[in-house]
Amino acid sequence: GTIICGGSCLPAGLDGTCCVGPFGDGIACGPAAECCGGVCMANGTGCAHDCNLGLISCGGECQVGTTADTCCLGPTGSGIVCGPSAECCGGICVEAGQGCAQHCAGGLVNCGGECLPGDSSASCCLGPTGPGILCEATAQCCDGVCVVDGQGCAKHCGDALLSCGGQCLPGAVGDSCCIGPMGAGILCEATAECCSGVCLSDGQGCAHECGAGLVKCGGQCLPGHGTSTCCLGPTGAGVLCASDAECCEGICFA
């Protein structure tokens, strides 16, 4: 007899089954066979739901293994069989207590989902994307990087360093921290003024008290004199108009 399979009439017995492949073509499988992606496999092997003795189902396939073994699936869904003394880490079998184990073996410390070489005095330092490194007891963790304690992002900065914008910067007594719009900082000397993350000479820029020859207007010290008038625009910025000029929405007209 024949059966219709994959658009063709194929010779098959009464118990034959059609096995269609990924491209639509077909073959006829016998009663003792299993269809797996267009290939006839012996029942209990290949992609069978119930695997034969000595095989276990893992990643949609019957693989060699025992009930003591574990199926280890990778990111794509395919799998391998790990022995009873192994740990599954992202589709790879590693020795228990290593790799991504929750309980790391002696001489290893769990950090960023991995067992890394270290001792109890080491600290886990996680980076922005999640992976980690181990810092020694004398080091500070700053966004996934180990730096000497008292430097970098340390809360308590070392000698000749001042905390500014989350970092320890070289400075002296009297310097001031100047934070910019993005949160980063620089240090200004005692004679300087901080204006939106930029250090300017005192009495200039956004200073509260403008220096000689400058007039406060729109939050800035602009060149002008006592007869000048401040003309503010719609955004709050200003220009100085002469005494005989008219201010119209930030523009001086004679």
Image: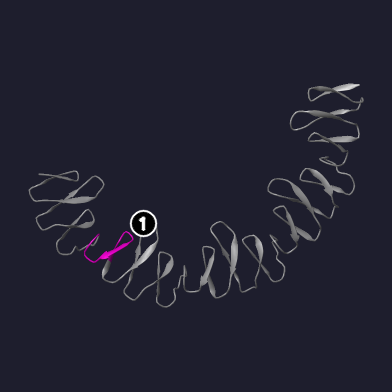
Closer to us: 67 or 148: 148
Q: Is residue 202 left or right of residue 224?
A: right
Residues in magenta, as a range: 193-205
Residue 5 x/y as whole percent: 81, 25
Q: Of the residues shown, which amino acid type is indicated by label 1? A: Pro
Q: Is residue 41 magenta?
A: no
The 10 Å Cα crowd at callout 1, few under 14, some 14 to 19, many 20 or more, is: few
Type of colouring: one colour
Q: Given the current orientation, which residue lies at the most extreme left position?
A: 244
Q: Quadrant of the N terminus?
A: top right
Say which residue appears at 74% left-offset and 30% top-offset: 23
Closer to us: 1 or 86: 1
Q: Quadrant of the C terminus?
A: top left
- Which image quadrant is residue 215 in? bottom left
Q: Is residue 146 left or right of residue 21?
A: left
Q: Is residue 84 above or below residue 25?
A: below
Residue 62 x/y as whole percent: 83, 45
Q: Which residue is mark 1?
A: 181
Helix, strand or loop for disc 1: loop
Q: Given the current orientation, which residue lies at the most extreme bottom position?
A: 159
